[in-house]
Image (cartoon, helix red, strand yellow):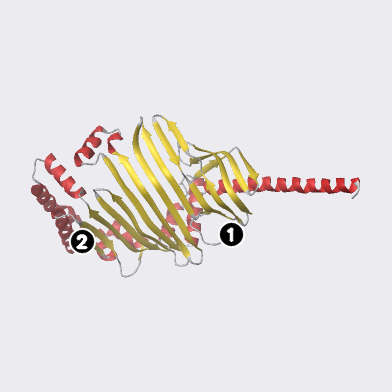
Amino acid sequence: MSALSARSVLAGLALVLAGSTSALAADAQAFGERLKSVMAGQSVVLSYAGATADGDDVVLGDAKITPQRPGAEALGLGDLRFEDVAGSTPEGWRAGRVVLNDVDQAEGGTRVTVSGASVEGLSLKGTNDTSAALSPVYFERANVGTVGIEKDGKSVVGVENVRLQNAGSATEGYRSTFDVGKFRVNTTASGAPGGAAVMTELGYPQVSGDVSGVASWNPQSGALTLSPLQIEVDDAGELAFAYTITGYTPSFIQSLAQLSEQMKATNGQSEGAGMAVIGLVSQLYLQSASLEFEDRSLTNRLLDYFAKQNNQSREQLVSSLTGMMPLALGTLQNPAFQAKVSGAVTDFLQNPKSLRIEIAPPAPVPATQIIGAAMGAPQTLPQVLNVDVRSGN
């Protein structure tokens, strides 16, 4: 090969490499701008000093996020590295993994720490993508090792092992599972002396427990289900909440987003906003819902505490509470339902085990019908929703 040919090849190779580098840099910038755009749609402002490419990775330098609300403080995330980035803004972006830097931020006597946070299988919906999605941001897994909040040097809240996993597709539906391995709350560090004293007397100077839940969404039917959300507090009890609503379709989500943008633009002063909200709500139906509390000593502690405060025996307190229920429930003007509620609550107070409220209509009930009944004829709601209240004794 002649010297001239060699120089030509090297020059061509240099141009190719330079072009590749420019393309990667442009991709990094495009990825960062798309991420910023979709997060803004989730009411979070993302800012960063610059977006650079490092092989297949994209690094956002000195990244910060700020909730879109008055007086919100920015949370510094440092340099964020998104691994194995591929895609485009029209078609959508995907990143194999992003590990968030540990956070240790203090201000005004309050310190917040976050460690061990990562996200896997991150996807940003493309501008040309018209498929159904609850959000333009999707990820397969997210983990947070620990979260801590301190006030004046005292630990107030601690959270460990937060896990969230998503699976599914627009055709098959989506399913999410989430759990908080352990949470701890120091009730004596709340800054409210009266409340701290009450919690200590109840035997809860420290509160700990866990949270778990399963949620699903079917874009075809618009069924959105929580089944259930469970909050368990050690030596207190477990609260479980579940529901299914229908009508939460992709078109509903799109209309809701458009209405939200319109109301932001007019500061909620649009003349047609009220009718638009009613029109959206009319598309939703309540299929079922339940709320259940399983007691593990909380009720007994509360009864003993308030009996002592009122200079009563526990039996006297329970008797006075059950005696007040007919008057309290009388406004419902529904004797049959009043008797059902009174019997279940009396049974629970006398022997606390569990108390369950369940809504199970024979067919999904329009949200507008529920609102109308609540405003015009509240005594009909137990029949409209087929409400059942029962004690687990």
User: Does the rendering let one see residue 357?
Assistant: yes
Q: CA distance from mark 2 to mark 1?
A: 48 Å
The percent coordinates of residue 114 (x first, y second) are 44, 40
Question: Where is residue 130 shown, x and y percent of the image?
Answer: 57, 61
In the displayed structure image, the side of residue 297 where residue 319 appears, left or right: left
Q: Determine whether, in the image, residue 144 is placed left or right of residue 351.
A: right
Residue that appears at 45% across and 49% down: 143
Question: Which residue type does callout 1 highlight?
Answer: Asp
Q: 335 and 363: which one is in front?
A: 363
Residue at the spot x=22%, y=38% of the render? 200
Query: Horizontally, is 25 left or right of 110 in the view?
Result: right
- The residue wearing badge 1 is 129
* Sequence-earlier tag: 2 or 1: 1
Question: Can the viewer see residue 371 in this picture?
Answer: no
Instruction: Please tell me whether residue 272 is drawn above or below residue 78 in the rendered image.
Output: below
Name the residue: 38% across, 45% down: 160
Q: Are marks 2 and 1 in contact (CB under 8 Å)?
A: no
Residue at 54% from the left image edge and 50% from the top image edge: 97
Q: Which residue lies under the disc numbered 2?
A: 390
Q: Secondary structure at mark 1?
A: loop
On the image, which quarter does residue 293 sit in?
bottom left
Q: Secondary structure at mark 2?
A: strand
Instruction: Specify the quadrant of the image occupied by residue 70.
Output: top left
Q: In this view, which residue lies farthest toward the front? A: 1
Residue 300 place in picture, x, y as percent: 17, 48
Label 2 Cα neighbours within 10 Å, binned few <14 / some 14-19 / many ≥20: some
Q: Position of residue 241 (x, y in %)?
A: 32, 56
Crowd rating for badge 1 (residues with CA inside 10 Å; few <14, some 14–19, many 20+): few
From the viewer's perspective, is residue 236 above or below residue 249?
above
Number of labelled discs?
Answer: 2
Residue type, label 2: Arg
